[in-house]
């Protein structure tokens, strides 16, 4: 499974996920040109995307959804309430293929499932997503409101996660926002902080997590180094954690399948296929817990080495 965060933050959100021949875009808060060019930089053609799936009605997630549909022919998936609010507020324009789902429903694209979970964020009918290809599960968990019932169990089921880490409490309290806006952000319908996100990952049984990418960082009340420091203090320095860029695409992140990344040491005349080796490995007794933990740490170190430094950019909707 491959994940590319095309942008994440109050200036716009869009995430690309590809697995088992299925290509999906989540949210349309950046321009069609930006999405097209950023995907092309990684060898992806936006016209090949199978669906645009919308999390909620706020403009940093929906401002260009009509453009994606008209320009690239993408069917739009959203809840009826999200559709109605966006159409009323943003004058969505002519759209001919909008497919409604209810929060809590699972969407199917071939053999790939997209589970939707309702959130208490102050959108009209907000949801978050878990993408499941039957081997690995990846979560897109932003605009959460607060750590609601069921969220910890959802995180514990994941192999990788893009998780909201919106603000630093001290920066919010000392920043330029008026008290009412501060209360909205930190309240039950707003966003979760660096500390709340880190504690959520710490509390859950996250031993299966290959990596976490921090998302939707505030421009005014957070900074990547601040967010990363908070998470590393609670999760340890070996756990692979990165930040999605607030103005640019990040390098692709891979959610490895069970047999990916295995280095086989074999004789030159070994004709055993990689599939056979994986099947044989699966049939062996489980390794002791300390060995399993050592393998996870080794894998995490390898994955962590792939995270790159991020930069910044932005422009408009067409």
Image (cartoon, grey):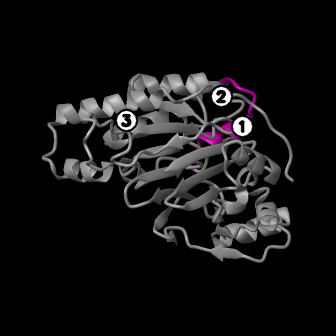
Among the 4 quarters of the image, the one containing residue 160:
top left
Check residue 233 for magenta coloring: no
Front-lying residue, 30 or 186:
30
Q: CA distance from mark 2 to mark 3?
A: 25 Å
Instruction: Say which residue appears at 85% left-offset and 69% top-offset.
Output: 93
Q: Tell whether label 3 touches label 2 (CB within 8 Å).
A: no
- If you read the primary sequence from the N terminus, does the residue marked by circle 2 or circle 1 appear first? 1
Residue in the image at 53% along x and 48% along y: 2
Circle on res. 202: 3
Q: Do residues under tags 2 and 1 come within 8 Å of each other at their CB atoms?
A: yes
State the SS at label 3: helix
On the image, numbered disc 2 is attached to which residue?
310
Q: Is residue 203 above or below residue 141?
A: above
In this view, the residue farthest toward the bottom is 96
Q: Which residue is mark 1?
A: 248
* Residue 56 image-quadrant placement: bottom right
User: Where residue 176 sits: x, y (%)?
Assistant: 75, 28
What x and y, as percent, mark residue 195? 49, 32
Residue 17, which numbered label?
none
Residue range of the region highlighted in magenta in the rendering: 174-188
């Amino acid at each position: 499974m491959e994940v590319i965060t095309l942008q994440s933050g109050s200036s716009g959100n869009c995430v690309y996920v590809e697995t088992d021949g299925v290509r999906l875009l989540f949210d349309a808060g950046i321009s069609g040109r930006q999405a097209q060019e950023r995907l092309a930089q990684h060898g992806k053609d936006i016209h090949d995307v199978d669906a645009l799936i919308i999390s909620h009605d706020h403009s940093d997630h929906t401002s260009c959804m009509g453009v994606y549909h008209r320009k690239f022919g993408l069917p739009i998936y959203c809840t009826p309430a999200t559709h109605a609010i966006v159409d009323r507020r943003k004058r969505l324009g002519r759209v001919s293929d909008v497919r409604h789902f209810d929060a809590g429903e699972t969407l199917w694209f071939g053999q790939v499932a997209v589970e939707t979970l309702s959130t208490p964020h102050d959108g009209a009918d907000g949801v978050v997503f878990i993408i499941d290809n039957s081997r690995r599960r990846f979560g897109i968990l932003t605009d959460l409101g607060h750590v609601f019932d069921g969220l910890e169990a959802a995180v514990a089921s994941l192999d990788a996660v893009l998780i909201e880490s919106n603000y630093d409490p001290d920066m919010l309290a000392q920043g330029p926002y008026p008290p009412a806006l501060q209360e909205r952000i930190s309240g039950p319908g707003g966003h979760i902080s660096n500390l709340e996100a880190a504690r959520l990952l710490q509390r859950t049984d996250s031993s299966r997590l290959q990596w976490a990418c921090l998302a939707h960082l505030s421009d005014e009340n957070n900074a990547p180094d601040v967010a990363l420091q908070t998470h590393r203090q609670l999760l340890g320095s070996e756990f692979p954690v990165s930040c999605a860029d607030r103005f640019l695409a990040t390098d692709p992140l891979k959610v490895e399948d069970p047999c990916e990344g295995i280095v086989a040491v074999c004789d030159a005349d070994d004709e055993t296929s990689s599939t056979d080796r994986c099947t044989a490995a699966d049939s062996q007794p489980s390794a002791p817990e300390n060995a399993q933990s050592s393998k996870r740490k080794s894998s995490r170190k390898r994955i962590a080495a792939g995270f790159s430094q991020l930069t910044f950019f932005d422009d408009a909707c067409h």
